Image (spheres, helix red, strand yellow):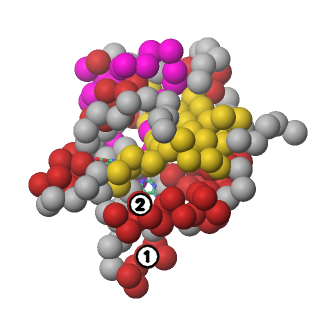
Amino acid sequence: MEQLYPKYGLPFTGEPLSPVQVFGRTAPLVLEIGSGMGETTAAIAEAHAEADFIAVEVHGPGIGSLLNRIASKDLRNLRVVRHDAVEVLERMIPDASLAAIHLFFPDPWPKKRHHKRRLVQPQFAALAARKLAPSGVLHAATDWPDYADHIRHVFSEHENFREVEGGFALRPATKFEARGRRLGHPIRDLYFRLEKTLQ
Ligand SMILES: C[S@@+](CC[C@H](N)C(=O)[O-])C[C@H]1O[C@@H](n2cnc3c(N)ncnc32)[C@H](O)[C@@H]1O
């Protein structure tokens, strides 16, 4: 963390960042929420050298693991932010700037009384609609069927999202996907495209 965050991390500033300044070029920009240990994040960034990626995570060991992957693969198109992803999305990501948002295996909060803690809520869909560029896609994956139904419901209620068949990148298996499979959970990938045009 001490050695690699200054090189591959971005400080949380609360101010909109300039993707051109961060990556030194203009390219499609993808934000990942909750990158965990970063295995999927790094694999997608490596497979999509034409795009730039920002991974947001709060878990220190996960950030450390992703920083090591970035260094060992010498990835120039991936940066990490250690902070709450909703705040990063709200305050650091310019409006209408994202080609995609990746949300892979968000914390499921399976108990009914905890459902309100789930990240995907109507206000999250509204925030995603503000930050995605026209035709940008939110790609969510989960192994909890009722969370998948909830995500589909929330995005279908938003007038500017349409469910589609695929997203920005193919998703390699994640650690939490393997865990879900071991438990016999079905894995669902859901894609919602922003249909709005720029005003
Ligand atoms: C179940 S894990 C999935 C990790 C990874 N996407 C995967 O599939 O292996 C959910 C991750 O989201 C992170 N997380 C939860 N809420 C977050 C938030 N508000 N901002 C950033 N990260 C968050 C957690 O720290 C955790 O690493």
Q: Are marks 1 and 2 in contact (CB under 8 Å)?
A: no
User: Closer to the N terminus: mark 1 or mark 2?
Assistant: 1
Q: Quadrant of residue 80?
A: top left
Q: Give percent across and percent down for residue 64.
A: 29, 40
- Does the Cβ of the disc 1 residue fall within 8 Å of ligand 1? no
Q: Give percent across and percent down for residue 172.
A: 29, 33
Q: Decide if residue 196 is in sight here.
A: yes
Amino acid on which the number 1 mark rests in the picture? His
Q: Which residue is mark 2?
A: 148
Q: Name the outermost residue toward the right.
A: 199
Quadrant where the C terminus lies?
top right
Q: Give percent across and percent down for residue 65.
A: 26, 38
149 is higher (above) or lower (below) than 46: below
Q: Number of numbered discs present?
A: 2
Give, as a single range, the part of the protein colored magenta: 46-72
Q: Give percent across and percent down for residue 138.
A: 54, 44
172 is higher (above) or lower (below) than 146: above
As for residue 118 lying within the magenta part, the answer is no
Residue 49 falls left or right of residue 63? right
Q: Quadrant of ligand 1?
A: bottom left
Q: Which residue is mark 1?
A: 115
As for residue 48 lying within the magenta part, the answer is yes
Q: Residue at x 36, y 20 (%)?
A: 46
Q: Residue at x 22, y 59 (%)?
A: 185
